[in-house]
Amino acid sequence: MLDKNGIAKRIAREVRDGYYVNLGIGIPTLVANYIPEGMNVVLQSENGLLGIGPFPFEGDENPDLINAGKQTITTTPGSSFFDSAMSFGMIRAGKVDLTILGAMEVSENGDIANWKIPGKMVKGMGGAMDLVASAKNIVVAMQHVNKAGESKLLPQCSLPLTGVGCVKKIVTELAVLDVLPEGGFKLLERAPGVSVETIQQATAGKLLIEGDIPEMNLD
Amino acid sequence: MNKVVASAQEAIADIHDGAVLMLGGFGLCGIPEHCIAALVEKGVKNLTCISNNAGVDDFGIGLMLQKRQVKKMISSYVGENAEFERQLLSGELEVELIPQGTLATRCMAAGYGMPAIFTPAGVGTEVAEGKETRIFNGKEYLLEYAFDADFAIVKAWKGDTMGNLIFKETARNFNPMMAMAGKITIAEVEELVPAGTLDPDHIHTPGIYVHRIFQGNHFEKRIEQRTLRQRP
């Protein structure tokens, strides 16, 4: 079973040289720590920056320079600033190669819910609805089950949707799964030490298992 | 062409009860903190505020929420504000949550003189309920209308006496398109300089969009999530 950093490390393997990548809040933010040395990747922050750098050292923090999670950040060489309309313009126009975000639920046809629990939690969708409506390549980073032990990979989402039929891949503490265009979660990899049976028990939606499922390679 | 006013109080003097305001900023970054303080001091009520976020409990628009000055918020993300969430769940505050890109683009449309835009954000979700849709190249889009705001209140890094504005780093965010979208646009700046001082090639918002400008005397610029890395 993976911890949050393990999930981030596995997702970093989806990143390719030359990609522009948008990282959501939470586990996705950690992915930046595992992008291999020497790989040229530009991180987009939807509040108006291409080229997110590491967090600043104490004393270097700048209130005018934050990421979409409102955390203080730095920039990388070659970075650029722009306004929010242009930021979502580049997202809508499909310029961002990979979007990694968290989710409360994903359905077997690729629907995602991550912005609202009616009557309990109403934080808002932020940029997530824009991202999932336009991104070509959406990877979800999340826990396989919720705090109550219920599967978050479902036949249908029970929470209000963020987007429809958009999630391509899911990485959890247990597994890597593709969401098939015809519907269903296809099991690709198991987390170290996790059995196929454990993944089956934790997946409420249709799970497709073909042949031997390899363990993730995280080296 | 001199747009300069003496203070935040003078800049917002004619903002009336029930006005529709746009307020620039993302989180607490690039917010018009002097005008917000002046609005709190003035005590104007029943406001509709279009702003990406609603501040935190004791800063930004959160200060206006504490004094129950806001009737309705139009925002994309309100997660950092307990008072906001309380007023929302109790029904005291009307809230319209909309996708962030839709928010930005509805401001942009107003500033560009376009009545509406089409966006895929929210298709198939509750955001789409009751909205006109149209298919382009096989993909469904929502019709979203340009905002109609009485006042836009923005914060810039530098400005000149003609209202030309330059923003800094990610404090730019919603400020340029909100500046373009208000019937009356008020800009507070860190440094106000004589017209002709700024390089015309560096202007982000041309002064034609700005009606009133003043220099704030001290910006607190509170940091919401101070996140650091260890020195090696």
Image (cartoon, coloured by chain):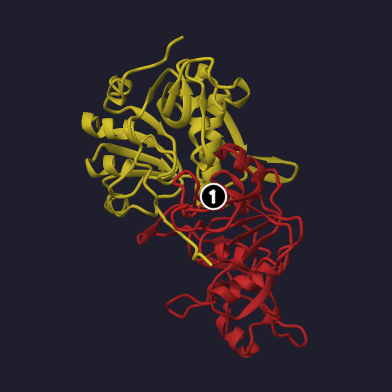
Q: Residue furthest top?
A: B1
Taking B50 as reference, is A167 left or right? right
Amino acid type of the residue that numbered disc 1 sits on in the rendered structure: Gly
Taking A21 as reference, is B179 left or right? left
Taking B105 as reference, is B64 left or right? left
**Is the residue marked by circle 1 packed among few (<14), some (14-19), or many (20+) residues within 10 Å?**
many
* Residue A187 in the image, given as x and y percentages of width and height: 69, 78
* Residue B164 in the image, given as x and y percentages of width and height: 51, 21
- Closer to us: B96 or A90: A90
* Residue B78 in the image, given as x and y percentages of width and height: 40, 50
Q: From this viewpoint, is residue A29 visible?
A: yes
Which chain did the image draw in red? A
Taking B14 as reference, is A2 left or right? right
Q: Is residue B9 above or below residue A164?
A: above
- Closer to us: B173 or A72: A72
* Residue A162 in the image, given as x and y percentages of width and height: 54, 56
- Closer to us: B129 or B163: B163
Name the secondary structure under disc 1.
Answer: loop
Q: Please state, as top left, top right, bottom left or bottom right, where the C terminus of chain B lies in the image.
A: bottom right
User: Can you tell which quarter of the image residue A35 is in?
Assistant: bottom right
Disc 1 designates what residue?
A: A127
Q: Residue at x 56, y 74 (%)?
A: A5
Q: Residue at x 78, y 86 (%)?
A: A211
Q: Is residue A65 above or below residue B143?
A: below
What colour denotes chain B? yellow
